[in-house]
Image: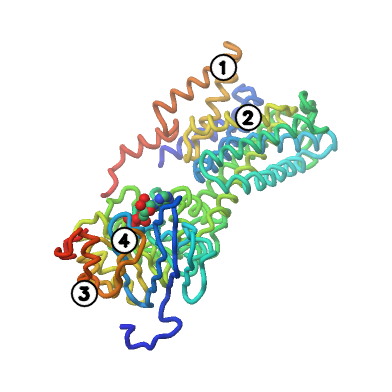
Amino acid sequence: MAATVPPTADEYILETRGLTKEFSGFLAVSNVDLKVRRGHIHALIGPNGAGKTTFFNLLTKFLIPTRGAIIYRGRDITPEKPAQVARAGMVRSFQLSAVFPHLTALENVRIALQRALGTTFHFWRHQATLGVLDARARELLELVDLAALAGVVAVELPYGRKRALEIATTLAMDPELLLLDEPTQGMAQEDVERVTALIRQAAANRTVLMVEHNMRVVSTIADTITVLQRGQIIASGSYAEVSRNPQVLEAYMGSADTELENAH
Amino acid sequence: MRLTAVAYGLLALFALGVPLLGIYPVFMMQLLCLAMFACAYNLLLGFGRMLSFGHAAFFGAAAYATGWLVTAHAWGPGAAIVAGVVVAGLLGLAVGALAIRRQGIYFAMITLALAQLVYFVCLEAPFTGGENGLQGVPRGKLLGFLPLKSDVVLYYVVLAAFVAVFLFIRRVVHSPFGQVLKAIRDNEPRAISLGYEINRYKLLAFVLSATLAGFAGSLKALVFGFVTLSDVQQSTSGEVILMTLLGGTGTFFGPVVGAAVVATLQQYLSDLVGGWVIAIIGVVFVACVLSFRRGIVGELAAARWLRRAPPPR
Ligand SMILES: Nc1ncnc2c1ncn2[C@@H]1O[C@H](COP(=O)(O)OP(=O)(O)O)[C@@H](O)[C@H]1O
Ligand SMILES: [Mg+2]
């Protein structure tokens, strides 16, 4: 898709330069140079402990990098704070489901919409004034098939529905760059398909960087795949390229003969 | 819900009729001050999940400020209460700004340390009366005409103040700010990832809680006519935690019930068993925490909720 566009300064929405995170001598993320092309679905894969979540935490400033720089939309955001990065349009989901358990599904989504009203500090106003956001919140819930459960407190939703709610909340931010950490993990097959379709739909007008273990999902929707192992990039490219890379097969299966299709 | 409305109605009737029922109004006023203090504390703990070990600092500082202004400077009670509340709010801003940089037990320890500091200031400062505290604090006339010297008049003033604070806290919890506060309580990283500078919201909650705690302290100074070191003491901070947990954190009425239980036990048991009352309250507290963790009102609400239709899956 982006191949027809000539390379320009804003061809890449996100770029990391020599990004490194050391945990008391242990290199969880090591010298990672990654470029995420605007409009792409970019998958980040790699065995458990490869440093994928740590990398996400660095991008969203939940962790301070030991070395390296993060360039988002042509701007160095390395010194910024996590909430600032989120407001700039880079919004993440979490590997373990992250909802507000004691708020209803509708309220969960509304939290993401609420900042736009500029009344988040108004403790004297009634929350009924947030009602103007309900229509939009319901639309987003509809998107993930949760409209019927809008009034249910999130803690009572089954796991797959919680993850769907999390995606709806993330989308409510209308992010330019969506970071998803294993969005289909622990989901039943039918939920996986629903979420995959949703990600594809959401990616129509934004960029997605996702950590994903399910190779079927990755092979169907990812434009680019980057493979991380022990904190380092060992391969990057299309699914066809990456899945034939012997180093990748080795990393996944300990043998170069097996197909990546079964990897987990 | 109808049951709740009836309960509130009966309670309102009882509260209004207290002077006719022959109940000692000073005891009821003490109870209302403690209940207001506990409600203020619950705003922080129940809805902001911030555990403060130093809330007596705000309660006591406001009590001292109000008591000193009416005693030494002949301020009217209204202005002195406002001043006390402002002092508590500013103190809350200072303590909160330092404490919210840390979480959980570290947060609690910072509030504890700063509250100790306030305690020592109250002990050493020239205008607080040292070990004796401030005695003979006059109640004066509210707004220049309402004679608070009458226990009955003051009782209705304190009752009105309590109801106002109770409704105010409900509003805060049910406000756009309350929504964000509950979100932060539920999941801090998630709230950050949605673009919220969570510390600012926590600080506002802290200041609101400190301010209302101060209101309770200022009223108490007028009700009893004295302010002593026990109002800023660690044990008072402990008492408010106890009342809140006992009644049920995160419920609106829990802290009121907790305050009523603690105040009643103190009032009636101390005549019978003297100093043992502290031990008895301690035992009641442990029994509560072990057998019903949600507190009295929390457990009642949970029981009613279970009897209703099960939640959709
Ligand atoms: N806060 C931390 N302190 C120390 N080590 C950590 C921390 N977070 C992650 N690690 C380590 O960094 C490595 C990468 O972890 P992670 O990024 O969670 O991997 P992945 O998401 O790819 O499975 C792991 O070995 C993990 O134990
Ligand atoms: Mg991970």
Q: Which amino acid does label 3 sit on?
A: Ala
Find the residue positioned furthest to the top.
Answer: B272
The percent coordinates of residue A161 (x first, y second) are: 28, 56
Disc 1 or disc 3, which is closer to the eye?
A: 3
Q: Give the labeled residue for mark 1.
A: B277
The Cα atoms of the two marked residues, 1 and 3, are separated by 77 Å
Depth check: give the residue in front, A21 or B298. A21
Contact, CB < 8 Å: mark 3 with mark 4? no
C-alpha separation, residue under disc 4 versus residue under disc 2? 53 Å
Task: Classify mark 3: helix, strand or loop.
Answer: helix
Mark 4 neighbour class, 10 Å CA radius: few under 14, some 14 to 19, many 20 or more: many
Q: Where is residue A242 in the image (x, y as percent from the top left)?
A: 24, 71
Q: How far apart are the alpha carbons under marks 3 and 2? A: 67 Å
Q: Residue at x 55, y 56 (%)?
A: A125
| Tag 1 and tag 2, C-beta contact below 8 Å | no
Quadrant of the image for the C terminus of chain A? bottom left
**Which dot marks residue A240?**
3
Q: Which amino acid does label 1 sit on?
A: Val
Q: What element carries label 4?
A: strand
| Pointer 4 residue | A229
The quadrant of the image that shows the N terminus of chain A is bottom left
Frontmost of labels 1 and 2 is 2
- Camera-nearest label, 3 or 2: 3
* SS for dot 1: helix
At label 2, the amino acid type is Gln
* Subunit under mark 2: B
For this view, does B34 lie left or right of residue A180? right
The chain carrying label 4 is: A
Chain letter for mark 1, please: B
